[in-house]
Image (tube, helix red, strand yellow):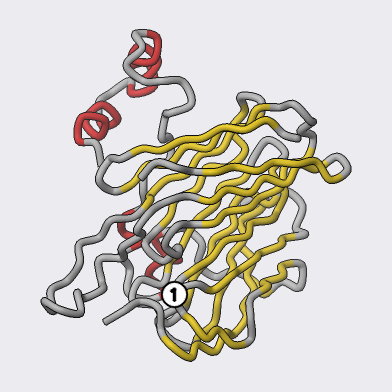
């Protein structure tokens, strides 16, 4: 991460400092990485640790979340995953691969009309559940789908 | 790492936006097959997408997204002609961005 930005954010009145910096042209509009990067969550070695760091533990199983992924992935380096959340007010879709060295794959924040939908391609080191966790209205929901991996995609 | 491509099209009142990025997406866990040494982490950490100037997607990624990442998402209320801008930042501070009009 950008150490200068870190120190700016740590300072008191961070919002006004950022505003001034933006006005001075130091930050290009639309390039303010508001959320930072949740290092603790992405470097957690197990799913419980990752979800705890994401503030997304204890999700209730939900039939309103669909995880689309192949039953069998011959190549674990490229596993297509699509998550559809029909839960109203879906704010975050979080994707994890339970048995990966670092289980947390991605956290998608959705707003301003973005629907409860993301499609991407992930790496899987071994056969395991792909887990989708949804944050909506201050609550946490989850769903999972098992993907059998023939050749692991995380190298080793 | 430049060379992101975006395609955006309307389906009813929902815009479907698809992006293909160029990035090695190294997890930091993989060992080089020849030297046996760990290949350092080098992956996109943040992805932001705006439609018509409003942030619609603000994502954090680990190295578990596949090499040369694919991302698709849908935005309700967008319309043909709206500008889509997607920006990425990686763990070495390298940035990439691309834009497209919704067709």
At x 51%, y 62%, the residue is A56
Residue sitting farthest toward the right: B12
Q: Nearer the viewer, residue A32 or A76?
A: A76
Q: Is residue B29 left or right of residue A16?
A: left
The spot of residue B82 in percent (x, y) is: 71, 27
Q: Is residue B61 left or right of residue A133?
A: left
The spot of residue B58 in percent (x, y) is: 52, 42
Q: Is residue B22 above or below residue A125?
A: above
What's the chain of the residue with tag 1? A
Residue A24 visible in image: yes
Picture quadrant where residue A43 is located = bottom left
Q: How many marks?
A: 1
Q: Is residue B86 left or right of residue B39?
A: right
At x 45%, y 66%, the residue is A51
Q: Is residue A8 above or below residue B65?
A: above
Q: Is residue A92 left or right of residue B78?
A: left
> The N terminus of chain B appears in which quarter of the rendering?
top left
Write down the residue under mark 1.
A77
| Label 1: element kind | loop
Q: Residues within 10 Å of mark 1 (few under 14, many from 20)?
A: many
Picture quadrant where residue A146 is located = bottom right
At x 15%, y 79%, the residue is B34
The spot of residue B7 in percent (x, y) is: 65, 43
Picture quadrant where residue A63 is located = bottom right
């Amino acid at each position: 991460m950008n150490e200068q930005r870190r120190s700016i954010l740590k300072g008191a009145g961070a919002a006004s400092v950022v505003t001034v910096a933006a006005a001075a042209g130091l930050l290009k509009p639309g390039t303010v990485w508001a959320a930072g990067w949740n290092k603790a969550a992405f470097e957690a070695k197990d799913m419980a640790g990752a979800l705890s760091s994401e503030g997304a533990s204890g999700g209730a199983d939900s039939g309103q979340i669909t995880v689309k992924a192949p039953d069998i992935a011959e190549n674990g380096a490229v596993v297509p995953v699509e998550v559809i959340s029909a839960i109203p007010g879906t704010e975050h879709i979080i994707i994890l691969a339970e048995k990966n060295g670092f289980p947390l794959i991605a956290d998608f924040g959705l707003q301003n009309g973005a629907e409860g939908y993301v499609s991407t391609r992930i790496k899987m080191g071994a056969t395991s559940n792909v887990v989708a966790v949804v944050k909506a209205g201050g609550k946490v929901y989850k769903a999972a789908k098992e993907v059998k991996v023939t050749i692991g995609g995380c190298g080793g | 790492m430049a060379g992101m491509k975006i395609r955006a099209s309307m389906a009813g009142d929902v815009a479907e936006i698809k992006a293909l990025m160029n990035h090695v997406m190294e997890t930091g866990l993989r060992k080089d097959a020849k030297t046996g040494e760990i290949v350092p982490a080098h992956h996109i950490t943040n992805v932001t997408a705006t439609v018509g100037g409003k942030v619609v997607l603000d994502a954090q990624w680990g190295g578990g997204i596949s090499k040369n990442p694919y991302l698709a998402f849908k935005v309700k209320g967008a319309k043909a002609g709206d500008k889509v801008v997607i920006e990425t930042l990686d763990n070495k501070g390298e940035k990439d961005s691309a834009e497209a009009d919704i067709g």
